[in-house]
Amino acid sequence: RRGGYLIGLIGSGIGSSLSPALHEREADRLGVRYLYRLLDIDDLALPAAAIGDLLSAARLAGYDGVNVTHPGKQLVLDHLDELSPETADLGAANTVVFTGGRAIGHNTDWSGFARAVGRGLPDASLDAVVLLGAGGAGSAVAHAVLTLGAGHVRIFDLDARRGAALVEALRARFGADRVSGGRLSDGGAELAAALRSADGLVHATPTGMAAHPGLPVPVDLLRPRLWVADVVYRPLDTELVTAARERGCRVLDGGRMAVFQAADSFRLFTGIDPDEEAMMRHFDAL
Ligand code: NAD
């Protein structure tokens, strides 16, 4: 190794991303030289379709790898030489490693969430899980909970077609009896019924971000025996996280997923095991 790592983040509007600080601080702690640069397609005045060119440019410029975020996670697949099996299943990559002249795609959103659940909700029952949101994050966390052994996942999305597509894709991989879809067009009755008999709720819509304030489910559906995992991490204490804590639920905030996906990417880029607890503490202080 020629003395260090050069890593990029490709995405749109990523100026305030915490990834550079998370990666570089852990590398510093390990005594590894590591530069994590933002390749913001907005700042570069590029269209999303230029992601392939940006990836080639990074490779030519000697980058060891890149993380990819919105809007590139799906678009990037066409420009990769090889995909990890899960990346192919999910149809999205958030980590690209340049090695031996090849660009290899990985997805650490799902693995990060899986390990966040293992760490943050140990022994939580996964018999019946309700998932709200079937977009990029929803696909990853659904894959994670099913891989962790969830008995049944019931999926709701305002966009019924998107929800149905995810149900179909997951059934093909994990079995038809383990995944079903619910409607939201009935005013929330089906969601309420599903939550009353669920062990846990995973929330994967943008609701609760500064630009999308609010609670994604009625607060009275948050019973103490229901665990609640939110993927939203800006802010960490979303209205859902706060309400669930107040009502006595076990809660996993989106910060853990953010840290563990970063830790998994760091491991793929360097082959070095990061200290996830140290990264967690650092994240909390950011
Ligand atoms: P996306 O646009 O791909 O998907 C969001 C989905 O939610 C859409 O299908 C939309 O129809 C649905 N939706 C929106 N409001 C809804 C509602 N009230 N009820 C039901 N469905 C609703 O977005 P995404 O990339 O999946 O991101 C979702 C959130 O996850 C964002 O806040 C993002 O920041 C967060 N995220 C967090 C991490 C992490 O590491 N913690 C990783 C990825 C994404």
Image (cartoon, helix red, strand yellow):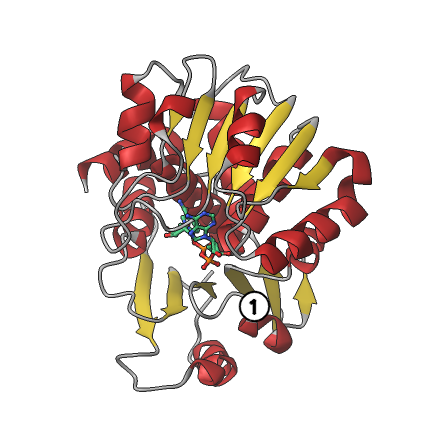
Q: Nearer the viewer, residue 184 or 105?
A: 184
Name the residue rendered at 54%, 63% in the picture. Answer: 97
**What amino acid type should be assigned to the residue bearing mark 1?**
Gln
Name the residue rendered at 29%, 65% in the picture. Answer: 14
Image quarter of residue 70: bottom left
Tell me: 104 left or right of 158.
Answer: right
Does the image show residue 149?
no
Q: Position of residue 9 (x, y in %)?
A: 38, 65
For label 1, the crowd category at 10 Å Cα-Cα, with few meaning under 14, some 14 to 19 and many 20 or more, is some
Of helix, strand and loop, which one carries label 1?
Answer: loop
Image quarter of residue 82: bottom right
Q: Position of residue 109 (x, y in %)?
A: 51, 48
Determine which residue is flagged by label 1.
74
Name the residue rendered at 50%, 48% in the picture. Answer: 133
Q: Nearer the viewer, residue 31 or 220?
A: 220
Depicted 12 relative to depicted 173: above or below: below
